[in-house]
Image (cartoon, coloured by chain):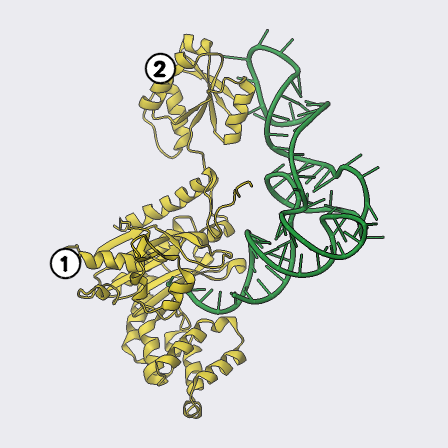
Chain colours: A yellow, B green
Amino acid sequence: MALPTQPYKGARDFYPEDKRLQKFIFGKLRQTVEAFGYEEYDAPILEPTDLYLSKGNQEIIDEQTYTFKDRGDRSVTIRTEMTPTVSRMVAGRRQELAYPLRWYSIPNLWRYERPQRGRLREFWQLNVDIFGVDNMNAELEVIQIMDACLKAFHAKHDMYTIRINSREFMSYVMHWYLEFDEVQAASAVRLIDRMHKMDRADFITQIDGVCTPTQREEGVVEKLLDVLDAKRISDLPQLVREHSSLAKLQTLLDSLTGVGITNAVFDITLMRGFDYYTDIVFEVFDTHPENNRSMFGGGRYDGMVAMFGVEPVPTVGFGMGDATLQNFLELHNLLPQLKPETDAYVVLVGDVYDKAQRVLKELRQDGGMRLSVDISGRKMDKQFKTAEKKGIHYVIIIGDDELEKQQYTLRNIQTGVEEKHGISRLVSIIEDYRNPSALHDRD
RNA sequence: GCGGAUGUAGCUCAGUUGGUUAGAGCGCCGGGUUGUGGCUCCGGAGGUCGUGGGUUCAAUCCCCAUCAUUCGCCCCA
């Protein structure tokens, strides 16, 4: 019985061309967040199951995680998100860390889900968090970083929208304005989250079902609709418009406009589940008609660190999945043709490998060249074919003739143009190709 | 967990209204002689038609199941 060559369901193999793309994307992301002073951290892929249970969601653990017993009968779970882990790490050194603390990571995460477009079982997720800032500057910075991450790939503002809402405000609306209890609020939030996917009559019917008869008579459904219909803060009913959470939200929106982020909008229907977020939440949406959906988002979660028994630390962060980002970049045509890691393919003519060693060493060590040498002993045409297939731009031909004159043949695979040069000239030509924008100061 | 679509060579796909050795393009391998790929010419390998069962004289084609891929729903930390 032959073994299957497919990777595990919902997980991907990264062949060199795939890995090259991942390296490119992650490289841009790292560069971007590090420009804002964020430091990279990492942690084990395995966590005690209790870490995720603390959110009190047994159902999610049972159905959507990889959870099993280790040999010591301890229940462990493969990490499904980074937030509990990073909160654990911060809590562990709560007193000694330097705040504001800016951390990021690109962990691989596993969720036991049915794979579909943009959603896999194993994925990578850029996590960016700022700890220890309790004012809106934290939200401003984090949203700026999300924006900068997309701009790093030359995305334009009309390709995506940043939607922002205040969880604190919605909580006020639910509990004080509408007088919903916890269960009602949770159902309403779930419905609001899906509001744009159903027609209005359907939505009204379902909201109606959440209300008690008394609430219905008091017109709670209409009150809620009035709130939800607000396209801007000033559209909100007088009674709720004065709430303090809205002033903060408005400040944030103004600040974003101030820093040139003009595609950020208030969206009262934005919920992001009903988990650990405590105030501002935000989400980035693709505007492309074929991919018009939420890509990633985040928000403020001031309570998570305190679950580890230390004083609370205010936190704002976001998570960006690799599959959705890649979808976005592909759809908007933002992925460049990537060059292979190898600068030149060395074609050997005849039995000269031993004699060529000195030259190869010089090119590699002194010149910093990344060379792949054809040691197969095959005829030249086969060697060329390999170079072309690998997508390598240059071929360096080394035979007795070259070794004797110390002038090596450099062939451009695309144009077929050949030149003979000494080592230092070879190095500078190849470097120019590798890094076209850099200026070289050599003669 | 629920529903739809798909599953024929490495890839993209034809095809058989059920009937002798299943095809194309691209790719792959070899050759057109000795220091040169991409063009061209010649030759070649490669498929138990996703898997298992059923109907039939006969199944890649019809039926059932199963697995995989994919789209949507649920969910989405």
Mark 1 residue type: Gln
Q: What element carries label 2?
A: helix
From the viewer's perspective, is residue A42 above or below residue A391? below
Residue A169 % position (x, y): 32, 76
Residue contact between numbered discs 1 and 2, judged by CB atoms under 8 Å: no
From the viewer's perspective, is residue A33 above or below residue A388? below
From the viewer's perspective, is residue A398 above or below residue B4? above
Residue B32 % position (x, y): 66, 15
Quadrant where the image shows the C terminus of chain A: top left
Drawn side of residue A148 relative to residue A329, left or right: left
> What residue does disc 1 label?
A95
Splitting the image into 4 quarters, where does residue A324 fall? Answer: bottom left
> What residue does disc 2 label?
A358
Determine the residue positioned at 50% across, 78% down: A203
Residue A55 % position (x, y): 31, 67
Residue A225 % position (x, y): 44, 81
**Residue A41 visible in image:** yes
Decide: few, some or many residues near mark 2? Use Cα within 10 Å; few <14, some 14-19, many ≥20. Answer: few
User: Separation of disc 1 and disc 2 at Cα?
Assistant: 56 Å
Drawn side of residue A196 relative to residue A297, left or right: right
Q: Which mark is residue A109?
A: none
Drawn side of residue A9 relative to residue A227, left or right: right
Mark 2 residue type: Arg
Q: Mark 2 lies on which chain?
A: A
Splitting the image into 4 quarters, where does residue A283 fall? Answer: bottom left
- Disc 1 with disc 2 on a shared chain: yes
Q: Which chain carries label 1?
A: A
Decide: few, some or many residues near mark 1? Use Cα within 10 Å; few <14, some 14-19, many ≥20. Answer: few
